[in-house]
Image (cartoon, rainbow, N blue to C red):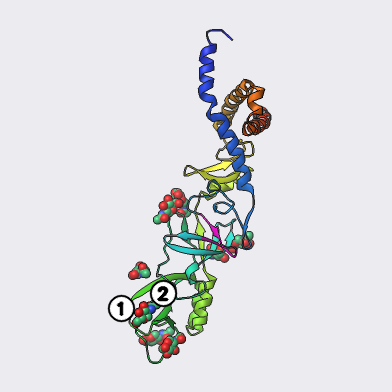
C-alpha cells in the first residue's frame, strides 16, 4: 500500500466501521425472532401480525395483536376484533367484533369501519344493523331485545324493523357472513340466530406487501417491517427484498459489490480489535463470533455468484 494512501484509507474506515457491525448483528437477531413460533388460542401467528413474543419489526405496523389466552385480538378504528381463523395462503382471516362476542348490548356504540388501506371484505358479507334506545312495542317481535333499561331491535336483509328507524337513539352496523344473514331471515329473526351470526364473524382479506412476503419466504427469509418499509430478514444477516440472488443481473452485481465492501470492512474491523477489548465486553465478543460466521458464509455465497 502506498504510504500517502494509508491515512485517507484509515479515516474512511473509521467513519464506515461504526454502523456496520451494529446493523449486521441486529439483522441476524431479527431473522431468528421473526421465525420463532407464537401461538395464541389454537392459532399460530406469523407475518403480517406482531405482538406478544413477536417484536414490532416482525409484522406490518397496522397488524398489532394482543392475546388474552383464548384468542388473538386487534384494534382498528376504535373497535376490537377477535380473530377466529387465519389463512396465510389466501391472506384471509375470519374475525368477530370483540364487543359483540357475548352480548348484543355493548358498553359503547361503535360502527364497524375498516382501515381500507390494509383490509377489504371478501365477497360474502352482509350487514346486520342493531338499533338501540327504541320505543317498546306491546307485542314484542322476535328481533326485539332488552339492554338493561333500553329496548333494541335488529335487522338484516329483508327482516322488518317493526319501528321507525328515526324513533331509535342510535344504531350500529356489524358485518356477518351472507349465509348467517340468510339463516336469520329463514329462521324468523330470533335472538339466538343473532347471537350465532355475531359469533360466526365475517371474512377479511389483508394487504400487507403480500407478494413481497411470498417472494421473501420462498427465498428462505422472514418477512417484517423496518422504518415503515417491507423488509426481508435473511439468515446471513442481509436485509434485502429477498434472500437469494438469481432474478436480475443488476441485483446480483449489487450483492457482489455489497459483499466485497462488507467483507473488507468487517475483516478490517475484526483485525483492529485487541484481544483485551474482546474479553472486556461479552456483547462485543458475541458480535465478533456472529460476524466471523457471517463473513465465512458470505465468502461462500459470493463465490457461488461468480460460477
Ligand atoms: C391504516 O393503516 C395504515 C397502515 O398501517 C396506517 O398508516 C394508518 O394510520 C391507518 N389508518 C387509521 C385511521 O388507523
Ligand atoms: C385457506 O383457504 C382455502 C380456500 O378457502 C382452503 O382451500 C385452504 O385449505 C385454507 N388453508 C388453511 C390453512 O386453512
Ligand atoms: C354508524 O354509521 C351510520 C351511517 O354510516 C351512522 O348514521 C350512525 O350514526 C353510526 N353509528 C355510530 C354509533 O357511530
Ligand atoms: C324486554 O322487556 C319488556 C318489559 O320488561 C318485556 O315485555 C319483553 O318481553 C322483554 N324482551 C325480551 C326479548 O326479553
Ligand atoms: C336506566 O334508567 C335510569 C332512570 O331512567 C337512568 O338513571 C339510568 O342511567 C339508566 N341506566 C342505563 C344503563 O341506561
Ligand atoms: C315486512 O313488512 C312488509 C309490510 O310492512 C311486508 O310486506 C313484508 O312481508 C315484511 N317482511 C318480512 C320478512 O316479514
Ligand atoms: C372469505 O374468507 C373466509 C375466511 O377465510 C373464507 O372461508 C371464504 O372462502 C372467503 N370467501 C371468499 C369469497 O374469498
Ligand atoms: C395494497 O396496498 C398497496 C400499498 O399499500 C397498494 O398500492 C395496492 O393497490 C393495494 N392492493 C390492494 C389489492 O388493495
Is residue 170 in view from this perspective?
Answer: yes
Q: Is residue 65 magenta?
A: yes
In this picture, residue 153 sits left or right of residue 307 = left
Q: Which range is magenta?
A: 64-73
Residue at mark 2: 129
Front residue of 176 and 138: 138
Residue at mark 1: 166
Q: Is residue 224 magenta?
A: no
Is residue 124 in view from this perspective?
Answer: no
Residue 266 lies, with reference to residue 239, above or below; the image says above
Secondary structure under tag 2 reads strand
In this picture, residue 268 sits left or right of residue 158 = right
Q: Are marks 2 and 1 in contact (CB under 8 Å)?
A: no
Q: Please, which residue is most extreme toward the bottom here?
A: 139
Secondary structure under tag 1 reads helix
Residue 89 lies, with reference to residue 191, above or below; the image says above
Q: Please, which residue is most extreme toward the top here?
A: 3
Residue 149 image position (x, y, % from top left): 39, 82
Q: How many marks?
A: 2
Does label 2 or label 1 sit earlier along the sequence?
2
Q: Please, which residue is most extreme toward the front here?
A: 280
Residue shown at 54% from the left, 21% from the top = 13
Instruction: Classify the position of the C terminus by image quarter.
Output: top right
Residue 103 lies, with reference to residue 95, above or below; the image says below
Instruction: Classify the position of the N terminus by image quarter.
Output: top right
Amino acid at each position: 500500500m502506498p504510504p500517502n494512501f494509508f491515512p485517507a484509507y484509515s479515516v474512511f474506515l473509521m467513519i464506515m466501521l461504526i454502523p456496520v457491525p451494529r446493523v449486521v448483528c441486529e439483522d441476524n437477531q431479527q431473522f431468528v425472532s421473526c421465525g420463532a413460533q407464537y401461538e395464541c388460542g389454537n392459532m399460530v401467528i406469523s407475518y403480517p401480525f406482531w405482538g406478544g413474543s413477536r417484536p414490532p419489526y416482525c409484522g406490518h405496523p397496522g397488524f398489532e395483536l394482543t392475546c388474552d389466552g383464548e384468542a388473538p385480538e386487534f384494534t382498528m378504528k376504535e373497535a376490537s376484533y377477535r380473530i377466529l381463523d387465519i389463512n396465510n395462503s389466501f391472506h384471509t382471516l375470519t374475525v368477530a367484533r370483540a364487543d359483540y362476542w357475548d352480548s348484543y348490548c355493548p358498553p359503547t356504540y361503535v360502527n364497524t369501519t375498516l382501515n381500507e388501506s390494509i383490509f377489504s371484505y371478501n365477497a360474502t358479507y352482509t350487514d346486520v344493523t342493531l338499533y338501540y334506545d327504541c320505543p317498546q312495542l306491546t307485542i314484542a317481535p322476535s328481533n326485539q331485545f332488552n339492554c338493561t333499561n333500553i329496548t333494541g331491535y335488529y335487522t338484516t336483509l329483508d327482516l322488518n324493523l317493526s319501528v321507525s328507524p328515526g324513533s331509535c337513539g342510535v344504531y350500529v352496523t356489524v358485518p356477518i357472513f351472507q349465509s348467517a344473514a340468510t339463516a336469520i331471515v329463514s329462521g324468523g329473526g330470533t335472538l339466538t340466530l343473532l347471537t350465532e351470526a355475531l359469533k360466526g364473524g365475517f371474512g377479511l382479506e389483508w394487504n400487507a406487501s403480500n407478494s413481497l412476503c411470498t417472494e421473501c419466504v420462498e427465498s428462505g427469509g422472514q418477512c417484517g417491517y423496518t422504518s415503515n418499509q417491507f423488509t426481508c430478514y435473511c439468515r446471513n444477516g442481509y436485509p434485502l427484498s429477498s434472500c437469494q440472488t438469481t432474478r436480475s443481473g443488476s441485483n446480483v452485481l449489487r450483492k457482489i459489490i455489497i459483499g466485497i465492501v462488507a467483507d473488507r470492512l468487517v475483516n478490517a474491523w475484526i483485525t483492529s480489535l485487541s484481544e483485551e477489548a474482546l474479553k472486556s465486553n461479552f456483547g462485543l465478543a458475541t458480535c465478533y463470533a456472529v460476524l466471523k460466521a457471517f463473513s465465512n458464509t458470505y465468502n461462500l455465497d459470493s463465490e457461488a455468484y461468480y460460477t
